[in-house]
Amino acid sequence: MDYHVKDLSLASQGLLRIEWAEREMPVLRRIRERFSQERPLEGVVVGACLHVTTETANLMITLKEGGAQVSLCASNPLSTQDDVAAALVEEYGIPVFAIKGEDKDTYYSHIASVLAAKPRVTLDDGADLISTLHFLAQGREGELSASLERVFSRWSARERETLVERVIGSTEETTTGVIRLKSLASQGKLLFPVVAVNDADTKHLFDNRYGTGQSTIDGILRATNRLIAGSVFVVCGYGWCGRGVAMRARGMGARVIVTEVDPIRALEAVMDGFMVMPLSQAARVGDFFVTVTGDIAVIREEHFAVMKDGAMVANSGHFNVEIDLEALEAMSVTRRRLRPFVDEYVLKDGRRIVVLGEGRLVNLVAAEGHPSAVMDMSFADQALAVEYLVREGEALAPRVYPLPRELDVEVARIKLFSMGIEIDKLTPQQEEYLSSWEMGT
Ligand code: NAI
């Protein structure tokens, strides 16, 4: 079996952590039990580009038990848990291509390894696997990385075409990936159907909000061990992730400022009780800054120029483009690593700006990503989306689709059941009332 991980001797530790996560994933466990009986993915080659975490391991095991031939690479160069990668290879026989801290060229060579297995269904977190397939179809893979060019220059044009033609469909895990894919679809260039798992209610309402909320704070704490209480904590972006981060920072006693560009989201933040102001003002007073916008160059030169000595900046949005580190580098006289994932930049006037996790997803780089209980739902959605694509993907046009509503609701139902929580049912009278228009005052 071909694979590329850091150290196979980490497998036993990884196995324990995968099992620890599994305890908190009852919905996925139930799907796994059904999959192992029904084998709905029998013989289907599945390629995944996801953060290599304990929860992802449980998803991979579920797909394999459903009969799929799975291979996995990382969706971020710094988010891999090397012990988990080792355990998947050693204990479960799943090919993994991922090493924490890999450079960009290695990152893409790992994507190439997953594509070389000729997947019929792909899973993405950020759309790097799908976009690589689209670059390949256009013969433009060299624009992404030299390693892709090295691998695929040996492939004929026909082999590249069949690689793409074989794909039944894909799933996408995160907001940024869905935005990229909708842009591809709107240009009429999307080559196969994609299920936007992120848009399922059981995904973004919980994973993006409660998952990112808790794990972002966790990443900041593990990296810095600083006190949040009494600090001024600036959250850039009040989407699903931003709401979670702001809520949890407030819960720990921070005075939270929200920055936004969308008037409705900004108003929501105001009425949720947060201070809202432009970043140019917040930059002067913040102790911690977290970007969760999915946007580019949100914190940039003009903001670094007015920050307090010792201000800490971190990103929890998908790509490492939200903090303009090039600008900070250019403004700095020295840079040194103070602790793992903590880099201090000293500016010409002596002020120190501290960057966490190299501006990459701080929750995955400095902590372990979302808690398993929340990934349980996201990855239950993923497993059901893969099953749906295998069953119905051939009939779908190349567009971005929502997860079918009944699957979304089913995941919520099983989650509630696993938590021992019951809810009411509509009575026949209520059903009739809610579907009628005749009854008024
Ligand atoms: P969202 O679309 O719900 O929210 C983004 C918000 O940022 C919007 O309200 C938008 O108006 C605002 N925004 C855009 N540019 C801005 C700017 N320059 N200044 C201030 N606000 C700005 O997206 P969501 O779901 O909250 O995701 C945000 C990012 O986090 C995405 O990149 C997503 O892929 C990523 N993500 C990260 C996770 C993690 O584990 N750290 C988990 C889930 C999503």
Image (cartoon, rainbow, N blue to C red):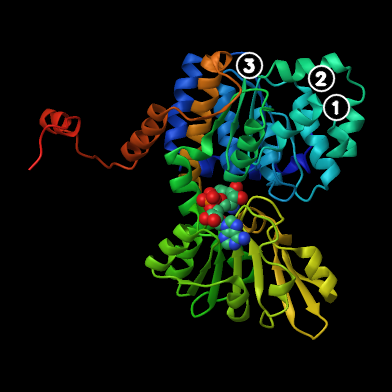
- Give the crowd class for mark 2: few <14, some 14-19, many >=20 residues within 10 Å: some
Where does label 2 land, which residue?
Answer: 160
Q: Nearer the viewer, residue 83 or 328?
A: 328
Q: Position of residue 401 (x, y in %)?
A: 52, 29
The local crowd at label 3, few if under 14, some if 14 to 19, many if 20 or more residues have their Cα within 10 Å, is some
Tell me which amino acid carries mark 3.
Answer: Val
Question: Residue, x 67% and y 37% (percent of image)?
Answer: 127
Q: Say if mark 1 contacts mark 3, CB within 8 Å.
A: no
Measure how far apart labels 2 and 3 are at the Cα level: 19 Å
Q: Nearer the viewer, residue 52 or 50?
A: 50
> Mark 2 and mark 1 in contact (Cβ < 8 Å)?
yes
Task: Give the residue pinned by disc 3.
Answer: 44
Q: Is residue 434 left or right of residue 276?
A: left
- In depth, the one of 399 and 248 nearer the eye is 399
User: In whole angstroms, how far apart are the C-alphas of marks 1 and 2?
Assistant: 8 Å
Other residues around mark 1 within 10 Å, as few (<14) / some (14–19) / many (≥20): some
Q: Is mark 3 within 8 Å of ligand 1?
A: no
Q: Quadrant of the N terminus?
A: top right
Q: Is residue 437 above or below residue 43?
A: below
Q: Residue furthest bottom?
A: 349
Which of pointers 1 and 2 lies earlier in the amino acid sequence? 1
